[in-house]
Image (cartoon, rainbow, N blue to C red):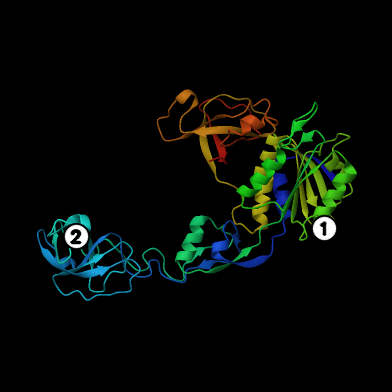
Amino acid sequence: MNDDGLVSAAAWGDWLRAQIATTAVVERAVTEAHGLVLAEDAVARYDLPLWANSAMDGYAVRAADLGVGVSLRVLGEVPAGSGADPEMPVGCAVRIMTGAAVPTDADAVIPVERTRSADGETWARDTVQILEPVAEGANIRRPGEDTRAGTVLAAAGTRLTAARQAALAAAGVERVRVHAAPRVAVVVTGSELCAPGQVPQRGQIPESNSVLIAGLLREVGLEPVAVRHSRDDAAGARALLAELARGMVDSSGCDLILTTGGIGPGTHDVVRIALESEPGVRGAHVAVRPGAPQRAGRLTDGPLVIALPGNPVSAAVSFELFVRPVLLGMQGAARTERPRVQAVAGADWRGKVGRLQVLPVRVDDAGEAGRTVDAPQLCCVPAVNPRGVSHAVGGHGTADGYALVAEDRGDVRAGETVPVILVGS
């Protein structure tokens, strides 16, 4: 295993992405493909809308027949889902519901609110009076005005959100070719960790990294195949990594093993010790705060391993900067990083020249103490003490995003603008 000393966050991220092997391409029903990444373009089979349909509950009419006070004879009704196409002689109307196919003879739909029935009911039975005419084409959705058959609705490399799934289903796409979800195992290390629900004894702390990393995986749409705890025993850690790599814990094995803790120079840093014999794994001190110590590479037995720091905020920052792009890259995603927005700092904080500072922040449309800004603009304030970020799991839990302070910037002053990655809801 090589130790490369200090590297920039960008260089470390580039190196990690170079280790990616994309997952296999599989076919899935579009209803079962949420969160997966398309391996080929998805093309509309049908026009959207498929036929001319009503945008309103009202009456299908001929616009030329309309005028204030005009009465039309009502011939019947076309509900949504009906295949009826009633003839409409001059001076006639048909009751029609939203989404229903517009009769061929009609060229407009007048909302029911712009009509009156002879008996005072909402809907006329025999004769309807027009209170306000509409123009030809009014309230009719034309075939293909949204999307034409043959249009690429989602390109290869696109991750399927609920909205994209719905668009594909509406356009008649039944099955898609996607990259299989990566199989990810999680290993947290530390003899000081006690399981959730246990009372910590002297020297122990409640274990939260498994909850954190498993939750971050689920936010990317992945369910971990295994979540394990390793005590500070190098031989045991080495055996556990081998079991996960070879599929002895999960029969299909893993594409990626994520570990937290145990990568420093200490005598009990078991992940570093366990990986020392792996020629494909390298270590680095990344110029980022928090989360400087990092180790990663491909194990001899096959899967990629990314070893993150043990402090919770350091692990979360490392996941956002390095792991999330790798997971999306493994699925062939065209976009692997979140968008960054500009926000106004609502308070001063100390920076660190020579390090990319990734500071958990709370984000709102007003500054500190409710200070508003003249233009619609996001404001951010630190969610943790900038001088002690890595362990501040409580403050991190209130964060909406991460402010990114470039290596050459240093301190941030209230009123200055900083880029922010939004991660909270």
On the question of residue 1 being in view, the answer is no
- Answer with left or right where residue 282 lies relative to residue 384: right
Q: Quadrant of residue 303?
A: bottom right
Image marks 1 and 2: residues in contact by CB distance under 8 Å:
no
- Answer with left or right where residue 12 lies relative to residue 265: left
Could you tell which of marks 1 and 2 lies nearer the N-terminus? 2
Q: Amino acid at mark 1?
A: Arg
User: Which residue does the image show at 79% across and 28% down from the upper left?
Assistant: 201
- Answer with left or right where residue 149 lies relative to residue 138: right
User: Which residue does the image show at 13% across and 58% down from the upper left?
Assistant: 119
For this rendering, which residue is in front, 138 or 190? Answer: 190
User: Which residue does the image show at 53% across and 55% down from the upper left?
Assistant: 161
Q: Which mark is residue 134?
A: 2
User: Which residue does the image show at 28% across and 59% down from the upper left?
Assistant: 56
**Marks 1, 2: nearer the viewer:** 1
Where is residue 91? Give x, y as percent: 13, 70
Q: Which mark is residue 246?
A: 1
On the question of residue 355 being in view, the answer is yes
- Dot 2 falls on a residue whose secondary structure is loop
Residue at mark 1 to residue at mark 2: CA–CA distance: 70 Å
